[in-house]
Image (cartoon, coloured by chain):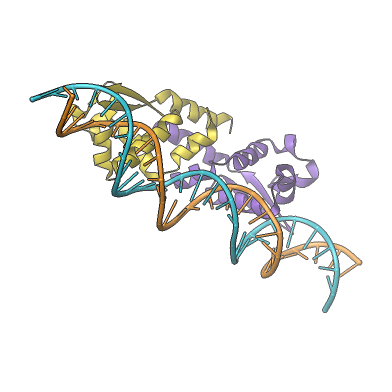
Chain colours: A yellow, B purple, C orange, D cyan
DNA sequence: TTGGGATATCGGGATTTTCCGATATAACTT
DNA sequence: AAGTTATATCGGAAAATCCCGATATCCCAA
C-alpha cells in the first residue's frame, strides 16, 4: 500500500469523479454497459468527456493505486471499486497518518 | 474543504513524514522547540534535511489544505496538526468518496 | 483472414510540482 | 540604529503530471 501513490491517484478532479460514479454504477450508467465485474471503459469515457486514451490511463493509475479492479471479458474491460482499499485508507488516515 | 488540494498536499513523502512527526511531537523533537501551539519551523527543517525555503513552502501547502495550523509567537512560527481535518477526511473517504 | 470495435500504449506540448539558492520581512538583541 | 535569528517569498531548473492524437493490441464477427 504505497501511500503517496494512492494520494496522487486521488489528486485529480476527473479521477475523483470516476470513483464517485463507480460508487453507484447503476445510478450513473445504463445496465447494458455494466455487470457484476463493474463498468466498461467506453461508457466511462463517454460520460467524462475526456479522450479514450486519457480515461484508459486514469483507470490504470487508479488500478495501480489499488483503488479499483479490472476484469477483462471479451473485448471489454470492466472496472469496479475495491471497497476494502477505501476502508483501509480511511482507517489509515484515522489512526496512522 | 477542497478534496483535490488535500490529496495533493498528502502526495509527497516529505510532507507525510512531517505530518507523522507532528502526530507525536514530544517523541520527535526536543521540548525547547515546541509548546502547546506546536513545533517551530527550524527544528522541522533540521530533522527533514531539506532546505529552509522548501520546508516553509511545504508547511504552507499543508496549512492551505487545512491539515495543520500555524501560530506566530515572537520570531517563531509553531505548527501543529488539525486533528479535526484528519477525522473529517477519514469520514469522507469512508462514506463519500 | 480480414475488418471493425474496445482498450492499451506511445510520443509529446502545456502545465504543475519539486526543491533549491537568493532575497525579503519580521522580531529580538545589544 | 545595526546586527542577528527565524521564517516567508521569489525566481528558476529539473522532473512529474495532464491530456491529447496516433498507433498498437486484442478480441469477435462475417
The residue closer to the viewer here, C10 or C27, is C10
| Up-down relation of residue B58 to residue A87 (above or below) | below
Numbered circles on residues, count? 0
Residue A96 lies in what quarter of the image? Answer: top right
Residue B79 lies, in percent from the top left, at 66, 48
Residue B84 lies in what quarter of the image? Answer: top right
Residue B86 lies, in percent from the top left, at 53, 38
Residue at point 67%, 38% (across, down): B21
Residue at point 25%, 41% (across, down): A47
The residue closer to the viewer here, B37 or B62, is B62
> Is residue A79 visible in the rendered structure shown here?
yes
> Is residue B97 visible in the rendered structure shown here?
no
Residue A2 lies, in percent from the top left, at 53, 30
Residue at point 45%, 42% (across, down): A11
Q: Quadrant of the C terminus of chain A?
A: top right
| Up-down relation of residue D18 to residue C22 (above or below) | above
The residue closer to the viewer here, C30 or A83, is A83
Residue at point 33%, 27% (across, down): A80
The residue closer to the viewer here, B24 or A29, is A29
Horizontal side of residue C26 vs A97, given as left or right: right
Horizontal side of residue A72 vs B74, given as left or right: left
| Up-down relation of residue C14 to residue C1 (above or below) | below
Amino acid at each position: 500500500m504505497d501511500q503517496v501513490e494512492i494520494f496522487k491517484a486521488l489528486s485529480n478532479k476527473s479521477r475523483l469523479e470516476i470513483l464517485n460514479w463507480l460508487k453507484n454504477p447503476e445510478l450513473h450508467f445504463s445496465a447494458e454497459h455494466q455487470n457484476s465485474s463493474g463498468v466498461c471503459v467506453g461508457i466511462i469515457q463517454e460520460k467524462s468527456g475526456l479522450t479514450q486514451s486519457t480515461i484508459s490511463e486514469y483507470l490504470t493509475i487508479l488500478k495501480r493505486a489499488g483503488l479499483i479492479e479490472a476484469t477483462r471479458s471479451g473485448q471489454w474491460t470492466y472496472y469496479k471499486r475495491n471497497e476494502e482499499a477505501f476502508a483501509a485508507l480511511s482507517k489509515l488516515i484515522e489512526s496512522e497518518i
